[in-house]
Image (cartoon, coloured by chain):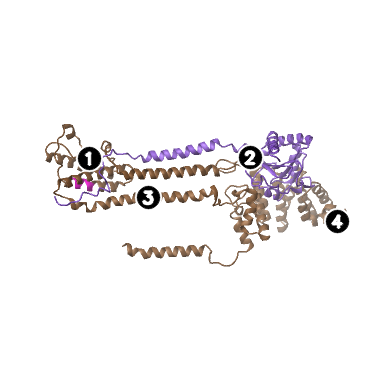
Chain colours: A brown, B purple
Amino acid sequence: MRSRRFPLWTLLAVVLVAALLVGSGAFSSTPPTSAQRAASIESVIRCPSCEDLSVADSSAPTAVTVRSTVRQLVDHGLTDSQIEDYLVARYGSAIVLDPPTSGWSSLVWVLPIAGGVIAVAVLAAVLARRRRRSGTSLDDDVLVPAADPVAVEERRRFLTQSLADADAEYLAGDLTDADYLSLRQRDLARLVALGPAPAAPATPTDWATPTAWADPEPVSGGPGREGSAGSAGSAASAASATVTAERSGTPLEPDRSDRVDRSVPRRRGRNKWFLVGAIGCFVVALVVAVPLFASHRLPGQTATGSVALSPSQQVARTLDQAATVENQGQLGLAAQLYQQVLTAHPDNEVALAQLGWLEYKIGQQGSDATLLADARTKLTQAVAMTPGDYAAHLYLGTLLLQLDGNASAAVSQFDQFLADSPPSTVVGQAATVLRQAYTSAGMAVPAEVAA
Amino acid sequence: MTGVLPPDTATAPPTTRPARRRHTARWVAVTVLVVAAGLIAVLATRQPAAVSEVQSPLVGTQAPPVRGLTVDGRAFALARPPGTFVVLNFFAPWCEPCQAEGPELVHFAFEHQQAGDAKMVSVVFDDSASDARSYQATLGATWPTLADPQGTIALSYGVRAPPSTFLIAPDGRVVAYIVAPVTAADLDGLIARARATGA
């Protein structure tokens, strides 16, 4: 049986190893493009302001910054490990999603493997013990019935011991109900087959013991016949009671009074201490490892690692996401996100201005008068709410110039835009529109725009 | 009387030693208890994160450059080495712990402006320059506040979240990193410690 199964297992193993090798890309020789390299690095770098999320999976502004830095460094020709080192030198080793394989951190890798090995070893020991147990009793039947009284007595002691062991193992949960029952019935049957125990001087109290079969001492009592009948009878009734209990779904515990004087093989005690020692080592390692990794908590971060966002932070995050998808050209999704912020906070001027601008752009493309009118309302409102927001002035000025052709009104908005010290990149992007407005209005183009 | 062997005594020696009962449930319970007690002890004796300095690979190394446009649109670059202690504070107007530490920073800046031995520089973390400008104006913060729209200064300092504060020594080394709201007394204490260790 075993020899027939062997080639099948070998075949499975070969197929598995081959599939893993091919799947791992060990045979693919084409070097990755720089975009592929950047993507693979981004997938192992943790987003600095999130928890357990790679920068590739996160749209948080810090993740966007890390992504652009990684791409720059890839373009500069740095190797993957140099780029990781660059980030580790700033954020610490926690910026890499996989914990390091050296030092204390390697416990994270070692402990689960050690735990698995210990579990398999314990399981193997338990199974081996059970197999040994059923294996040894196979040739025992040769002994029965032996003429030698000493051998019979040894045999009786062995069977009694075996029953006691079964009780102990069953109580410890090492035996299933079915195994326990079959072991017990077999040993009881053999005990009965050995015949009556030799008579020995005894007191009436001993004679009254109902579970005489389980006592390590020879069954004592009056006339031999009656003694054996008594022990066999009680054994049989105990067995049938167990069967009944097993059928009704509740495993029957052997009578507790039987087990008190049972002897247990020394080997089992050693196993127990081995198990306790292994678990102890595991626990100590765990207790050492946890504080190492339960490291600094960020403000607002809970013990489980998630960052509780205040409502204003949630708004800021939604706006960030909206800006990101807007930059990626997903205008519809961006509009939805801005609308989401506005629904919760109708006075959020950033969402108001950005949504107005999106509506203007979409309305321009489709010549949709309703959208354009709505854009005008939103942008006017945004400018009125926050006179210091350069973006709203830029958006409204652009609308006034391109939609109404009202250059002088546009210029007054652009003046305020420039007064709000916008970033030079924004001024650069808007330069064409700004020049057009100032020229049409017959005014001098401001120095910031001309530069 | 034939040579019948006794049963395999090696497998189940019929010793008469009293049985030792196995207490599986008790052992499991004790193990769980030890793990729980260990974790509770370790976590309870640790300093709460809110007041602790955290480790940064930058501590002990030369501070990365700090340069860019301020929220007022002026160019700013921190001298290297700066010559005085510099408190580099990453903040955001939307961050509540930053709002808590704001008055302390103003207090600290005022005291050391008189003495001339330390100065403040702020960097906006993930917010617009206009928001930060009005926030700083309301607070009464008159020191340089960099806009950092791309987050590049924050990245070069490995900042994960505001408020994050670095103390830079006169020789340009980073001597402390705090991820928590700081007080003027905290900063004075860190400066005194840095002086004592020869910064």
Q: Chain letter for mark 4, please.
A: A
Residue A414 location (% of width, % of height): 81, 50
- State the residue position of label 2: B53
Q: Quadrant of the C terminus of chain A?
A: bottom right
Within-10-Å neighbours for mark 1: few <14, some 14–19, many 20+: many
Please tell me in which quadrant of the rendered image residue B20 appears. Answer: top left
Q: Nearer the viewer, mark 1 or mark 3?
A: 1
Within-10-Å neighbours for mark 3: few <14, some 14–19, many 20+: few
Within-10-Å neighbours for mark 4: few <14, some 14–19, many 20+: some
Q: Nearer the viewer, mark 4 or mark 3?
A: 3
Overall secondary structure of the magenta section: helix
Q: Is residue A113 above or below residue A222?
A: below
Magenta span of residues: A185-191
Label 1–label 3 contact, CB within 8 A: no
Q: Secondary structure at mark 2?
A: loop
- State the residue position of label 1: A216
Task: Judge if badges 1 and 2 mark residues of a common chain.
Answer: no
Q: Earlier in the sequence, mark 1 or mark 4?
A: 1
- What's the residue type where badge 4 is placed? Thr
